Image: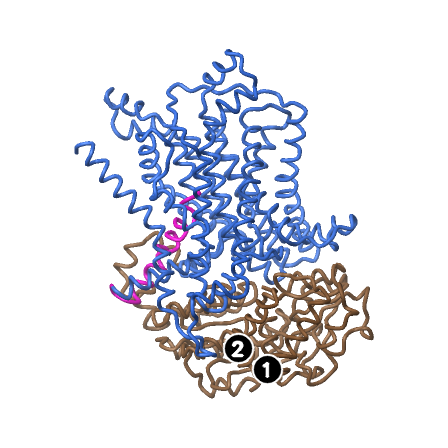
Chain colours: A blue, B brown
Amino acid sequence: MPPKRRNLTGFVAAAGVGGLVLIPLVGLISAIQQRTPDPFTGKTPQLTEVIRVSGAGQLLLNSVLLSIVVAVGAALLGGWLAWVEHRSEFPGRRWLTVATLLPLAMPSYILAGTLRSSLGPGGWIGGPLGLPHLTGFTIAAVVLIVVTAPLVQLIVGAALTRTSAAEEEAARSLGASPSKVFTAVTLPRLRPAIGLSGLLALLYAISDFGAVAVLDCHVLTWRLYDAVRGQDLARAAVLGVSVLLATIPLFAAARFIRGNAPGQDVANRRAAPRNPLGKTGIFTTAVAILLTVGLGLILPISTLCLWVLDGLERSLPFASAWTSLTHTVLAALIGTLVTITLAWLPARITAERARRSGSGSTSLFEEATYITSALPGVLLALGLMQAALMAARAFGGATVYHALLNLGVLLFAGYAARFLAEVFAPLKTGFSTFDPRQVESARVLGAGPWKRFRYVTLPSLGPSLTVAFLIGFNAILKELPVTLLLGGATGLQTLSFRVWDRYSESLWHDAGAAGLLIVGLAMLAVVCTLPWRRDV
Amino acid sequence: MRSLFALFLGVTTIACSPDPEGTSAEEAVEKPTLTIYSGRSESLVGPIFDKLEAEGKFNLQVQYGDTAEMVTRLITEGSESPADLIFAQDSGHLGVLAAKDLLTPLPETLLEQVDTRFQSTDKLWIGTSGRLRVLVYNTQSLNADSLPASLRELADPKWKGRLGWAPTNGSFQAHLSALRHAWGEEETEAWLNGVLANAPTAYPKNSPQVAAAHVGEIDIGWVNHYYLHRLDPTDRNASNWSFSAEEDAGNVLMVAGVGIRAGSPHEAEAHALIEHLISESTQAYFASEVYEYPTRPGVMTHADVQPLEEISLAPVDQSHMADLGPTRELLQRLGLM
């Protein structure tokens, strides 16, 4: 096939895959069109009313503000932790920077709930210290920063392992100060990773309901969930679409942060040296670790442990862990593989296009793969369900729809649509620093496609691929709305289902046990992938 | 688990199975698979379904989720829904399904077994158990003499800074809907404003309020009765309180119930399943293990739970609790959600 045609076919294929995530939007738009009158009042809702009434505008503003604060906070916190993990040396660095990643597996409502109860006026920490009620914008922002900072740490960390030590050494030998080397050489190389991971934190925050609900922070997702729970899918869809529209200017800001730095080609990369931290560095790191490990890990884990201990003391029954453990691992592994497979081609093509055009600019198609991530999981699942129903009604009816549910097709499509952006971002970062000339050389030397993939592409993409896997795996570990709505028919009962089920019923001991198992699985995944992600 | 297995067998299962729901032809002749959308927690009702399956009485596929979201799902799916039955946490949502003509009438043989107050007037759903709306209070800072005699008293300024509530919770909203019908719109809004002036602490649901009352974070919470009984009775600093004033609409029973989807091909089997849910043994399970009120007359409540006969229950029409739209608008107007 001539190269031009091959490129076109590849692009069409990638666009098709990217377009898959937009299917839920099609479903939601059809739900808006098919809205029915309220069974009690007989009124069909006017859509403009939905936006105008009851301060929806103010709530949308709160959502946007919260997500910006979270994105900036996560970029600073996660960015610093990535730097510390890959470029510095201090006692305990290895394990502390593993621990800072674990809040990734913590469902936001559990983190928010345990913080609120332990630090509140009646809590085991807040009580003796006389702390006030912990609710509102600030604490919600802190919780969301803590759970999203690991995304930044992972993605920026992967970019850091692929920066060129030689370039930095050259700058230093020309007399540049360390801060000058950082701002003039290293930072420009990290901008795409910082921009992309900040965008992920932003999308996470704008679509989150768990933390804001528990912490009484009024944002638009409240109104959106209320519409879903009030059986008004059309209203929820209108609110969802307005969230998407509000995110578009934020995309532009993220694009600006990503900058125009073309992807760099690193053929013979070597690790940059690690330096000991200065006084300010140690202080900043201590604060960062206190936030992520202290607030995001030790505090919730101690609370979960207290719940479990109380259950053991009172000899309360615990559900068997085996089924939920195997179901969770299975769902997370399959879901992550499916999502990575779907994200692979679009990530490669967008990175190559950016390289060819000589700039880091993004295409509309790339942004389309992110946009559905701004939708809360419940709305995304219902949108996908509505789209599947439309397809089923057109071709074959209920049987087709039931098969899509029973075989898990909708479930894994749901995971992919929900987490495509999170997996796409690290993959694209990887591909943009990937040197295609290496593959070409291998081809000239007679290596077949499998050998080229195994010995050239895979080692070079290793850190980014590992990060994509970790992010996808941990996201599915704690996922709930898609699992409940689209996974029920597969018989899947994950650990996060068990945490939610028990937590709702005040069966704290069993919720605690399932929560600890989730964190355990996350830790296992982070530790097992360490050699592929880090130089040392 | 069988369905999860089908996930792997994928195409083979679809190709070999004449039944789209994945049961083999042999089973289909004897016992079809009943699909249940359950808004009730797996931890509460799972053991009932497991037992029925283990006894070989039914093939069940139970899909769990939040009641409101499951009802939204069922409405979205319409006649394509795989659900045969819907098991809802509160009757309000069954009322929504009934109003949308998505439920099919139940036979008199089932309805006559349950207290008439706890079923739909148009025979479309049946109550399986109930939870009483109560105040939960911290026993170290309050005693029975100092507690409000009626719900209206919560607007008294003496409770400033001492209350908790959960305005986004389904039971809260259903109870408020009942108040709107009992007291009228204006009085309900004035009362809500009065309580709001007392700056109640907002919680996302009932259970954290009970925990907060237990540790003294709040003095009074407005909740459903059964969470209290999950706390260790030997080390409990909280208690439930029902109002002594009659005709106040404070003492309301929230009914959990079940309905059959109109168009379900398995109506007879669904009747048999409901028969089990309202049978004496299952009703006794709801009372003893879940601390709920049985809807079948003559079944004893748990010893730790105040019997229903001792409580002057407000005469609330269950359909009023389903009228949630204006309640939500009111809460939004007051900035509570």
Q: Position of residue B86 (x, y in %)?
A: 46, 72
Does B38 lie within the magenta span? no
- Nearer the observer, A134 or A448: A134
Q: Are marks 2 and 1 in contact (CB under 8 Å)?
A: yes
Q: Is residue A222 above or below residue A38?
A: above
> How many numbered discs?
2
Look at the magenta stretch and give its main secondary structure.
helix
x, y percent for residue B98: 45, 79
Read off the chain for label 2: B
**A282 displayed left or right of B16:** right
Please determine if labels 2 and 1 lie on a single subunit: yes
Mark 2 vs 1, N-terminal side: 1
SS class of the residue under badge 2?
A: loop
In the picture shown, does residue B6 fall above or below B313? above
Q: Is residue A385 visible?
A: yes
Q: Secondary structure at mark 1?
A: helix
The x, y position of residue A192, in whole percent, is: 44, 33
What's the mark number on residue B323?
2
Of residues A257 and A400, the one drawn nearer to the viewer in this rendering: A257
Q: Which residues are magenta?
A: A395-422
User: What type is the residue that disc 1 sits on?
Assistant: His
Is residue A323 visible to the viewer in this orientation of the structure? no
Q: Is residue A402 magenta?
A: yes
Quadrant for the N terminus of chain B in the image: bottom left
**Alpha-carbon neighbours of circle 2 within 10 Å: few (<14), some, or many (≥20)?**
many
> Which residue extends farthest left?
A1
Instruction: Tell me the residue that label 1 is attached to.
Output: B181
Amino acid beneath label 2:
Asp
Q: CA distance from mark 2 to mark 1?
A: 9 Å
Apparent side of residue B325 relative to residue B206 in the rendered image (left or right)? left
The residue lying at 60 percent from left, 64 percent from top is B335
In-image side of A245 versus B293 (left or right)? left
